[in-house]
Image (cartoon, rainbow, N blue to C red):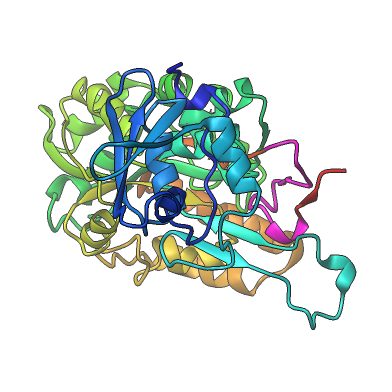
Amino acid sequence: MDVPVAHARDYVAAYGSVTAYQAADHRKDARHVFLHDVVGRKPVVSCAATDRISDVARRLLDSGSAAIVVLDDDHQALDVLTTERLVEWIADGGGDAGQTVAGDHYTYVPNPNYYDKSAVHWSKVVIRVITSQQSVLNALRTGQADVAVGDPSTVDAARKAGLDVAAAPLLWSGVVLADRGGTMAAPLKNPEVRQALNFATDRAAITKALFEGIGQPTAQVTVPGGYGFDPALNETYPYDPAKAKSLLAGAGYPNGFPLRMATPQYQQLNLIAQALKQQWKQVGVDLQITDQANANQFVSDTFGGKYPAFMTAFGQLPIWMEGPSLFLPNAAFNPFHYHDPTLQSLYDKSSRATGDAKAALDREVVAHVTNQAWFVPVVSTSLPYYSRKTVDNVQTSAKEPLLSLTEITPAG
């Protein structure tokens, strides 16, 4: 039997410091364990007897085998493990799950002195770091996890796997035209050039191709129902390549220009970037993309002002919080520290206002940023959360799009 791990009752990981199937219990001198596919006898993984079972299980999870044979250093068979047996062995308590390993998993147990015992729903909570979106989905499918943060690329697969999906509008994704002063890319200093890039963007096509069912085209730096949102603003830049070409010609760039842009590889931003490259090419703009797999390097380079433009997926915030993060002179997403006195004035008024007056001023802030084309927003999406039937109260809303872990309870 050799089936994809994602379709079997696979190796669920204990979250502790168990040795790899306790090889020493079989042979005291066995220093290593070699795990081979039962049918093909091909190597799957090798590990030291002291390796954590969680690490071994993750490697097995990617191996595609449904059963393994345990061999010693001399490749003599010690045992055969089916997935069911490994699951049973782990479930019987094979593991010290009370440990935390920084960067791998974090284990929480109840505070025995907490005053409200009724609010404590779990004897233990383990938060595991999983960087691969496919591995996240596999962890839920196989019972390794009950709840996980999802990704637009796996929403359909999650639903087909019978998982519950909770999501509320949270992110707008698009381009930060950071060099508004023209320090690196002189064309970006002209608002008409920035507006041209917005007119050259077919938001509906990108949304349909990459985010169908979970995204909406947008031209503003907020999300439906979010702070400062105005439905009318989404009509500011209809897809109009002829208009884009006219604006570029009027700004002195009838043949377009090259533009360097960086993108990370999460939230499908790199795919949006490639779509924009093809669309902007139609109006003469040569988008030169640096696709950075290392998210930390991407942040360091873009926030450090090494690129005149970069992709982002920005979460909705109250305007008074969004300003210092997104568009004020010292904001991280304004690495060239561009200052707009009108925007600063609107922001200051909005921050002091309350009630309906504040809501109106919030919309003015977003409208000003939109009309000045500091950004090329493309799509607004929800941040999906996946859960199994083992838990309840995994829910979000427009004003609270982030999941509250404290509200999750056992099912029933």
- Position of 382 compared to 306: left or right? right
Q: How many marks?
A: 0
Q: Tell me, yes or no, whether the highlighted magenta stretch contains residue 251.
A: no
Relative to 410, is 99 above or below? below
Please tell me in which quadrant of the rendered image residue 144 appears.
top right
Along the line of sight, the residue nearer the viewer: 296 or 228: 296
Residue at x-position 40% and y-position 55%:
24
- Give the magenta part as a residue range: 388-407
Q: Residue at x 46, y 30 (%)?
A: 153
Instruction: Give coordinates of residue 26: x percent, y percent.
Output: 42, 49
Q: Main secondary structure of the magenta part?
A: loop
Q: Quick one: 185 or 396, which is closer to the camera?
A: 396
Q: Which x, y percent locates residue 284?
A: 15, 25
Picture coordinates of residue 54 (x, y %)? 46, 51
Quadrant for residue 231, please give it.
top right
Does the rendering let one see residue 373? no
Name the spot of residue 79 as percent of width and height, x first. Answer: 44, 36
Q: Nearer the viewer, residue 170 or 67?
A: 67
Is residue 399 covered in magenta? yes
Residue 226 shown left or right of residue 380 in the figure:
right
Left or right: 44 in relation to 391: left
Residue 394 visible here:
yes
